[in-house]
Image: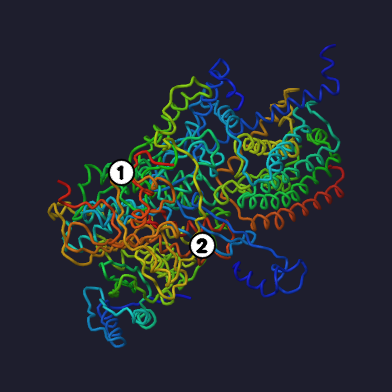
Amino acid sequence: MGVMQRFNEPNIITTSTDKLFNWARKNSLWPLQFGLACCAIEMMSTGMAHNDLDRFGAGFFTASPRQADVMIVSGTVSTKMAERMTRLYEQMPEPKWVIAMGACAISGGPFLDGYSVLMGADRVIPVDVYVPGCPPRPEALIFGIMTLQKKIERESQVAYERPRPALVDEDGNFLEYLPEREYTNISEGKAPRLEGIGELKRTHVFERRGMPPAAMTDVGWIPSDPDNTQEDGAAEEPADPRGTA
Amino acid sequence: MSLDILNQEPFRFLISFGAILFLVLNLAAVLTMAERKVSAYIQLRYGPNRVGPRGLLQPAADVFKLFTKENVSPSRADLWVFLLAPIAMFIPAAAVWLVIPFAPGAVVADLNIAIVFFIAITSIGALGVIMAGYGSRSNFSLLGALRGAAQMISYEVPLILSLLGIVMLTGSLSLVDVVNAQAGGFWHWYFLPQLPMFVVFYIAGLAEARRVPFDLPEGESEISGGFMVEYSGMTWALIQASEFASMGLISAIHVTLFLGGWQPPIDALDLGSFNWIWFGLKTALIIFTFQWIRWTMPRLRMDQLMDFGWKVLVPVCLIWLFVTAGAMLLLPSVF
Amino acid sequence: MSVTLPEGDLQSRLERYLKGFRNRHGLGESAVEGNVVRLVVEPNILPEVLATARDNLAVLHLSFITVVDLEGSFELTYELLDMRGGIVRVKMRLEGEEPVIDTVTNIYPTANFHEREAYDMFGIAFRGHPDLRRLYMWQDHFDHHPLLKSFEISTKRTFEGLR
Amino acid sequence: MLREERRAREQNRGGRASGRLAGPDVRDEFGLETLEMNMGPQHPAMHGLLRLILELDGETVVRCDPVMGYLHRSKEKISENRMYPSVVPITDRIDYMNNIAMEYGYCMAVEDLLDAEIPPRADAIRALLNELGRIMSHIPSIGFLLLELGAFTPILYAFRERERIQNMFEAITGARMMFHYIRIGGVKADLPEGMPEQMWEYIEGLEKRLKPDFMDLIEGNEIFIARTRGVGKMTQEKAIEMGLTGPPLRCTGVSYDVRRDYPYGWYKNLAFDVITDEAGDVEASYRVRIGEVQQSIRMIKQILENLPEGEVMADLGRRIRPSEGDGFGRAESARGEYVVHVVSDGSDTPYRVRYRTPCTVNMQLLKEIVPGHYLPDIMPIMGLIDPVSGSWDK
């Protein structure tokens, strides 16, 4: 509501409408019908008769992201899927929330070692509630939704300005999630036939010590060529814990 | 004196129009709630029960949330068409309520061509579907719109044909006349002599209201929302409201034409000006059967839908028209 | 219209398979072990051996193709089932870092996805494959063949590592 | 008709034709194009993360190209870097609707390497849970088929049964979905006290409920028959050519079941029928699945009637270190033939683990069978294959 943002500080109008809007939003959280992996079965189980998610007004699973309020990332996010997931997140209209369901969506879980697995959904989209478990029980997901409801209750449209950490640190690194992302045309085109196969890089050591290299947090990550990095110097310098834009 | 002014023409019309709009919007909200509750009980669940007493405030929460939701319009969309489509869908669904008699004397406009008005206005709804699908410029919505156009235009034919029997019997196109002609107990209602037409109107009405098994334009599991795949926030809410309003409208017309409108089942139960209770009860019954079918049946395919419409419903209508006409010719004393 | 699956005694059937392969292709190292006919073939005669299996011996089902990276060479296992208890296991050794082998999709169309997977994971090129694209990984964003032993992931967990 | 072909033909004619009728190929003369559409990876009916690149002519599908890999979790690579016992949780997550068969296949492969003897009670419990898992997978599959046809309610009835079975599994294994119950050399623990009786009671109840809750509701429905009969029809040759296994193969009439033809574990002692159907369409696959649920009930009853006593775990030592060689484990999962091929180099970790998942192979069917069908027919065909994305992507 653009009207409310004209106020500089909270007043009786914004706080009372806050109450109404937050009440409405928290009681009508429509999840996106977005089953990624194993946890999707438990997510469905949550919506089914035994643990009826519809009791909380959250049982309407929308097929289109345009009508959804909350995205339940239910399962492992592979690097191939990460771009699609980000796009779905950006297609959802504001206000929107994300629940990371299960160990894989939180950190990569049992597939942390894998070469094709994103280390948690929060590397590409902001996550509000984490529901641990592999997979979490339906009760745990319901608890996650209720936690999200509590979080929504505390939201306000206009608030006193609080001192916030700077967006950019001294080195010029961005500290917050920035939705700017280049979409490349990923086409499943024809492979290079026999003559093209020789050009592929054959040897690569895939390392994950501590935090991943900064470029890896982005979707469409290409592991840096060890030869190139030596030539370019600090172009792809890994192990920046905050990640760069 | 002061109240008499309200009964004068411009004021009377404006007030009743406001009342109808209020009724339609509330009907949509109540029907969403009813839909969720009915589906829940069919599916061995409870349905919404946390918001307000027994979950009755759930539609209010939904509506306020949709009000405050961002309204996304795709960058490649045809913006005017995209934004006008929900309105083009909602207005016909609301306008036909003007000619429906709710109780003796309680009708906003007693048109003498009310049935033609109904037919003409409801066919605008198909235009809204096409606009929504074309304007969103998405493959899914385009498919939904094409399906919607084909389906709604095809099922208009049996819908209109099934009304003709009643027009012949009544000799009038006014809905008030139709209701008055059914006075004197439920055996005088038209669903008995016009039983095939009653069924055809019911089925074609399901298709007109885009309900399962004819919800191909939406086809949630096929084209994930069809023509409304790109709508969000209030525009989506308006589309939903018009869907539910048109469902209520089809039920109300169905009741008015075949189930005696506000006429009580037997004369002893006549409630005078409170006869709208009968009208409401009958409409609610029809709506419940709509919802019952919605949560029980699978969806038809496009070609099967067309086959059913043109090869089954239309011939049935035509045959029964001839039967009705023949009966009126041969047994003029009865009719 | 209908497919006839082999019937009769399993042992005699296996002997018949073995004899059929030996008569046509030689194959000195082949033997029957349990319900398995083990064949070791040279890569260049693989399509002929598989064609014999399908057309002459009516072993209709290609179950899977396993590729094992032996660092320097690849071992391929084609497992064929006659769907009635008998197994024909064709093993062969492909030398070289970037091997090329003839496709068997014209004999067993089901090999399509198996070969695409082998190309994706190991970079083995199948000559004559109708649609050789990567199956799982990105065509243009992931330039490695991840199941090669030269592609290491950093967490190797061993028994000693537990302590 | 492929777009390239048309383009080539247009070029031969010298550019795009004008709107006049000039030849027999009317569609091209008008310059009509097919619609390219992208279904998935996020789509309600794609059973997870499948992407279909479709080319539509009206509502008819001209070309269908499945693109997989959106849930590729590098399970084979991870398995190579783990010790033998700790691969079992990874196999659990392959086919997450029917996990127990996945564990079973892997453990059989390692036991084949080790030449281990499994105690009979462990074997019987494995078969028991495998069949229970099959019911747990098949009944929701039927529900999903109906859900994608537009009927929402059967899935809730199906998940009610699944929930009850999951409760029993939780009592036995400690987990609702990812059991890690079948271990190399046996099973983790014996059945809890009173579980056979509880299971018997449930199975009796399911046998009674199966007809009123599922068969009566689904089979008589005219719309269900109209949507599924003759849809996705394939011949036996086609099915075998495509390497199909499981219900998609058996619904064409080819009687092939790993449990009978390559018997393993306790299945040698059980009497059961391999359910086949002649029609080879979606409705037939539904009938095959219902029949298999009934056969599973029959098998569970047989196992429960004479459940052997004794240990449930063979003594293989703490450190599992098979000698060099190949180990094969072939099991019938709910979706078809599941094979694990373990190659050992004599160390703690497997040198190579190959999972032959049924869904990957069955998915080839889409490319062959969908063209020519209408767009809404894709959903019942997906129900015919009933893939699980963890299983086709590994």
Chain where mark 1 sits: D
Q: Compared with residue A224, is residue D16 higher up or lower down, i.e. above or below?
A: below
* Image point (67%, 34%), residue name: B283
The residue closer to the viewer here, B170 or C99, is C99
Camera-nearest label, 1 or 2: 2
The residue pinned by badge 1 equals D168
The numbered mark at residue D65 is 2
- Residue B52 visible in the snapshot: yes
The quadrant of the picture occupied by the C terminus of chain D is bottom left
- Residue D271 visible in the snapshot: no
Q: According to the image, what is the colour scheme of the structure?
A: rainbow
* Image point (59%, 60%), residue name: D374
Give SS at disc 1.
Answer: helix
Structural distance between the alpha carbons of marks 1 and 2: 40 Å
Give the percent coordinates (x, y) of residue C39.
Answer: 27, 78
Give the percent coordinates (x, y) of residue D74.
Answer: 34, 55
The residue closer to the viewer here, D66 or A183, is A183
